[in-house]
Structures are given as structure tokens and as C-alpha cells.
Image (cartoon, rainbow, N blue to C red):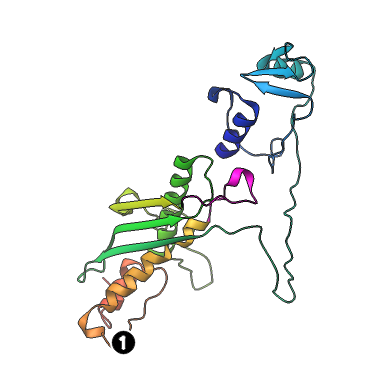
Amino acid sequence: RHRLGHIALRLMDLPKDRWAAGTAGLGTEVEAEIPASEAAVDFLGGFVVDRARPERRIPFADVVNEAYLNRVSLSEYAHYKFPHLTFNKLTGQGRAFLYYTQGAACSEVEIDSLTGETKVRRVDILMDLGRPINEALDRGQVAGAFVQGMGWVTTEKLHYSRDGLLLSHAPSTYKIPSIQDTPREFRIDLLENAANTVNVRGSKAVGEPPLLLAISVWTAIHDALRARPSWESKLPALELPATQEEVFRALHPGRKWE
């Protein structure tokens, strides 16, 4: 929502304090940016200006208020269909997506060989986000998605009863990452000069993709276990998620977790 807000402010040339991000719902859902108001009017400095007669201008707030009082809707709604998609579900061939959001991550972990406790010491991430609309917001998205992924691969284990009932069904019954679990050194860089030519203002979506990079934490744990001299010729079995109990089991085969 904030990224769309920045786009709207630029298109309408409005000050930053003249917008608010609402919550999507049945009455507010909008799925695409539409370059409206390009034919007849301009938005300049918070005013609606008639192109044919630039001297005629009305404060944008007055336009909104007048429309509201006269029950005139200023909303627009549309469905966007991605172009150039040629994916064939039967053959598995073709182009399935308009573009891809790529990234790479390198993680460093430290394991207590007595208890199996794992700490993520450092993470370096490089993401290709095209030309970011709001770089600070995008960096926050990358960090948040990665930490969420860390929970998936290290702590959030699913437990079921003998009858198949999911027991770990909420944060009260499984461990989610906290501020203490975040990497001590967390470096996030964005690829430069990588404009995406097929999306809004050269940008790329950055919601879920960084979550997948958290697998680097699991592989770092696996590599750390493999580094033990006794396992030079045999890789230890390590399940997902690599909880403290799971790491302890890999460290001490045959011993019970207490």
C-alpha cells in the first residue's frame, strides 16, 4: 500500500501528508495502478488544473469534498492481465510469469555442541529489486521476509496428535523468531542499475521472494555439523526445521533430548 501511495503522490503531484494507506476490504480493494486523469486535467501542487485553461484551478481537497457531498465516486477498479505469458500447463513449457525477483544470501551460524543451540551470527543478502520505489521500505521487506523464513527453517516445527490434529497451530504453541534471534550482523544490498522494464516505474515486487533465502541458514547449520572431525566422511541427517532438539539429535546420535 505504501509503494502505491508513493506512485499516486508522484502522478498527482501532491504533498506527502495528503494520503493515507487503508486496509483492503470489499469496498476498498484495488488491484492495479491506473494512469487516470491524463486526458483532461493535471495535478499540480495539490490543485486540479484544466489543461485547456491552466489559470482555472481548484484545490484537490475541495474536489474530493464536493464529490463526497454529491455522492460522486472517485474510485476506480480494474483487473490487470499480465501480457506475454505463454505457459502451457500440460507441457510445462513457456513463460509462466512476467518477471522474476532474484536474490542471493550467505549465512553464518554458531552452534553450541553441548546443547544444540544455534545463533545466526551474520547474514549478507543481495536482491535484484529493479529500480525501488521506496528503497528503505523494500529493505525492511527483505529483512522481515528473511527472518520469517528463519523461523520456518529453525524453530516452527509442526506437531500432530495421534489423531492427526495439528497441535502447534499458533505462536503460543510454536517458537517464532524474536529480536534475539535476528542476525547480529545483517547486511542487505540492492543490485544497482537493474531497472525492470516490464513493471511500474522499473520496480519489482518484494513480498515473499526473500523468505526463500532463509534456507541459507539451514544449509549453514548443516555445513557446521559436517565440519566436525567425526563426520568428515558421513553427512549427518538433519530435518527441517533444524530446531535445537533436532540439532542436538544430530550432534549426539542415540542420546535422548531432556
Residue 60 in the figure: left or right of residue 107: right
Give residue 236's position: percent from left, percent from top. 32, 81
Q: Magenta span has 73?
A: no
Residue 63, relative to residue 123: is it above or below? above
Frontmost residue, 64 versus 54: 54
Give residue 138's position: percent from left, percent from top. 48, 45
Residue 138, relative to residue 51: is it above or below? below
Residue under the image location 51 percent in, 64 percent down:
166
Residue under the image location 75 percent in, 27 percent down:
74
Residue under the image location 46 percent in, 50 percent down:
192
- Identify the magenta region: 192-208
Residue 73, relative to residue 130: is it above or below? above
Residue 158 in the figure: left or right of residue 180: right
Residue 241 in the figure: left or right of residue 6: left
Which quadrant is home to the N terminus? top right
Q: Magenta span has 195?
A: yes
Frontmost residue, 27 versus 229: 229
Q: Is residue 155 visible?
A: no
Residue under the image location 65 percent in, 51 percent down:
198
Q: Is residue 203 visible?
A: yes
Q: Give the labeled residue for mark 1.
A: 234
